[in-house]
């Protein structure tokens, strides 16, 4: 695997969970310094995540970023500093209801995201663990199909890796013409609007900034990162990335999580 080192990277998009941060949910001092060095060198840095906007803002504030923030896998893009909303592309309500009804028939736990809030049918261990991870509470509303009256930004299934393996191909076949469906973690299946991906969002941002794809680097670890790694001039998989992500990457770091981010920035932005 050969990648041409270049100091022409002007935009870096970094996934959050198990890329920017590890299991401790903290940004290391070294990673933070590498990001600041990239910004000082004239590079824009943004985060591109499946997380909610409000669950991503604390990391943006810690890093002091002033750029459009890609959240909900590209469905919601907003600048956390200026509060400028670039776009919101939810799942059409009709399709969301169809997806919800099918998921409920399978007995799946579902998170529905509306107006940057989480809505669930009941409180259970799955949502408790999720809330602890993102530091956001959930609203219990009973039957989500009855509750849903406006298009959700995203739907998320939380299950076991075995069940995700079993139902993901079926869901893609049944709803792939209505929604973008992707596995983001071993236990997560994410639904966004058709064509709504991190890669599409990153391409739009780069175009708005007047940048070519060769001036863009994307760094990630999970399957929902593949679209942005494939788009970017340099697509980087951190050392702990899924095998499918590594296959799609131009470069695989030796370091994992934040160490991999630091390695990629040092090599491809700072040239050291």
Image: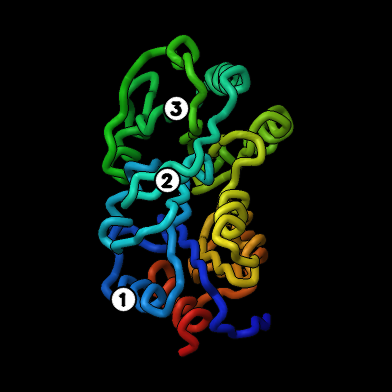
Residue 11 in picture, x, y percent from top left: 51, 67
Quarter of the image where the N terminus is located? bottom right
Q: In the rendered image, which residue does mark 1 sit on?
A: 33
Seen at 28% across and 38% down, the residue is: 136
Horizontal side, residue 120 vs residue 137: left or right: right
Q: Nearer the viewer, residue 113 or 103?
A: 113
- Is label 3 in contact with label 2 (beta carbons under 8 Å)? no
Q: In the rendered image, which residue does mark 2 sit on?
A: 78
**Gap between marks 2 and 1 measured at Cα:** 24 Å
Seen at 33% across and 44% down, the residue is: 55
Q: Nearer the viewer, residue 133 or 84?
A: 84
Crowding around mark 1 (Cα neighbors within 10 Å: few <14, some 14 to 19, many 20+) is: few
The mark found on residue 54 in the picture is none
Q: Secondary structure at mark 1?
A: helix
Mark 3 or 2, nearer chain start? 2
Question: For the residues carrying marks 3 and 2, which lies nearer the camera in this image?
Answer: 2
Q: Quadrant of residue 6?
A: bottom right
Let me know if residue 166 appears in the view: no
Seen at 30% across and 34% down, the residue is: 128
Residue 265 in picture, x, y percent from top left: 46, 77
Q: In the rendered image, which residue does mark 3 sit on?
A: 112
Mark 1 or 3, nearer chain start? 1
Question: For the residues carrying marks 1 and 3, which lies nearer the camera in this image?
Answer: 1
Residue 190 in picture, x, y percent from top left: 54, 38
Mark 2 or 1, nearer chain start? 1
Seen at 32% across and 20% down, the residue is: 140
């Amino acid at each position: 695997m050969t990648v041409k080192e270049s100091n022409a990277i002007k935009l870096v998009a970094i996934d959050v969970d198990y890329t920017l941060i590890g299991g401790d949910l903290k940004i290391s001092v070294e990673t933070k310094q590498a990001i600041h060095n990239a910004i000082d060198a004239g590079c824009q840095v943004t985060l591109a995540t499946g997380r909610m906007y409000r669950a991503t803002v604390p990391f943006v504030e810690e890093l002091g970023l002033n750029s459009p923030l890609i959240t909900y896998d590209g469905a919601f893009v907003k600048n956390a500093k200026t509060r400028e909303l670039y776009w919101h592309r939810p799942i059409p309500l009709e399709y969301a209801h169809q997806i919800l009804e099918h998921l409920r028939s399978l007995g799946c736990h579902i998170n529905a995201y509306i107006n940057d809030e989480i809505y669930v049918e009941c409180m259970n261990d799955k949502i408790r663990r999720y809330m602890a991870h993102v530091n956001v509470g959930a609203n219990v509303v009973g039957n989500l199909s009855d509750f849903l009256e406006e298009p959700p930004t995203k739907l998320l299934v939380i299950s076991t890796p075995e069940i995700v393996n079993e139902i993901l191909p079926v869901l893609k076949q049944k709803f792939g013409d209505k929604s973008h469906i992707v596995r983001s973690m071993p236990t997560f299946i994410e639904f966004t609007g058709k064509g709504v991906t991190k890669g599409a969002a990153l391409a739009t941002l780069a175009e708005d900034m007047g940048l070519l794809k060769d001036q863009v680097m994307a760094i990630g670890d999970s399957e929902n990162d593949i679209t942005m790694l494939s788009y970017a001039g340099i697509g980087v998989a951190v050392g702990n990335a899924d095998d499918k992500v590594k296959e799609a990457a131009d470069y695989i770091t030796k370091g994992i999580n934040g160490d991999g981010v630091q390695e990629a920035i040092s090599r491809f932005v700072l040239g050291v």
